[in-house]
Amino acid sequence: MITTNETKIVAKPGHQDLFIEREFEAPRDLVFRAFSEPDLLVQWLGPDNLTMEIDKFDNRSGGSYRFVHIDERGNRYGFNGAIHEVAPPERVIRTFEFEGLPERGHVAMEIALFEVLPHERTRLKIQSIFKSVEDRDGMIASGMERGMNQSYAKLDELLKK
Amino acid sequence: MLKQARRDVFHAIADPTRRAILALLALQAMTPNALAEHFDTTRQAVSKHIQVLADCQLLKQEQNGTQIYYHLDPTKMRDIDEWLAPFRKLWSDRFNRLDKVLDKMKREKK
């Protein structure tokens, strides 16, 4: 595949949600499977330099999940949530909490919609709604787990001096 | 210095009244008086907010007769967008990997 589809991120100042939108050159059932099957999910969800481990993935309405990203140093960054609804192949609604934060309770809700496009293509729309504007901005600013990773690397550098 | 300017921009948009002013000016250029009519606060308070936004170069002034009109300055607004860049990269890297996974799935299906 030569062309790469654009990833759109919309986060309006002062709002506590953000939108992620991306189109895929594959039919909806395949995209939905890549989101739902553990052996497929681990191939793309983990950030570049991290290994992803699935601790739990009970992917059904009323289920739950816990994923762990592991860096080269063996640091583990877990995140987990409750799965509110899985409606194959069009919708997944779940919560998200990053375990690396200093306190519990900063939970976001994610709504993922899979839309059929002509020519066997798919549009994915994710809306994440955070507890506060600060939570949302913090998530964006840190780049999430990658941000954590970099801050550990910086700390290591400082300690070496 | 650049970092300082950037922080100021985020300080500027952290205030709800200033965000409302930006939202109004996104629709059309306005005079300070016309802007003030949209708010319950005093004209002086609104002027102060306009000043903060102008200091951060988020607004451009245009003299039209005796009136001063304020516009959004798209250059600095782009800086705000840059703030999203690492987050966007995280997701676009992710989705580019997903493209490869989907490609493989398509080939295996055939």
Image (cartoon, rainbow, N blue to C red):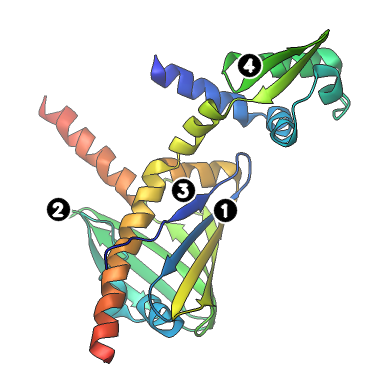
Residue at (50% x, 72% y) in the render? A82
Residue at (18% x, 28% y) in the render? A158
- Amino acid type at circle 2 is Glu
Residue indicated by mark 4 = B54
Closer to the observer: label 2 or label 3? 2
Chain identifier of the residue bearing label 1 in the image: A
Chain identifier of the residue bearing label 3 in the image: A
Residue at (50% x, 78% y) in the render? A118
Query: Of the numbered discs in the image, which one, if any, rests on residue A103?
Result: 3
- Amino acid type at circle 3 is Glu
Q: Secondary structure at mark 2?
A: loop
**In the rendered image of this protein, does residue B26 appear above or below residue B58?**
below
Q: Horizontal and vertical percent for residue B62?
A: 70, 15
Residue indicated by mark 2 = A72
Closer to the observer: label 1 or label 4? 4
**In the rendered image of this protein, does residue B70 appear above or below residue A52?**
above
Q: Horizontal and vertical percent for residue A129?
A: 58, 56
A137 sits to left or right of A146: right
Q: Nearer the viewer, residue A133 or B33?
A: B33
Residue indicated by mark 1 = A130
Whether callout 4 and callout 2 share a subunit is answered no
Q: Horizontal and vertical percent for residue A73?
A: 14, 51
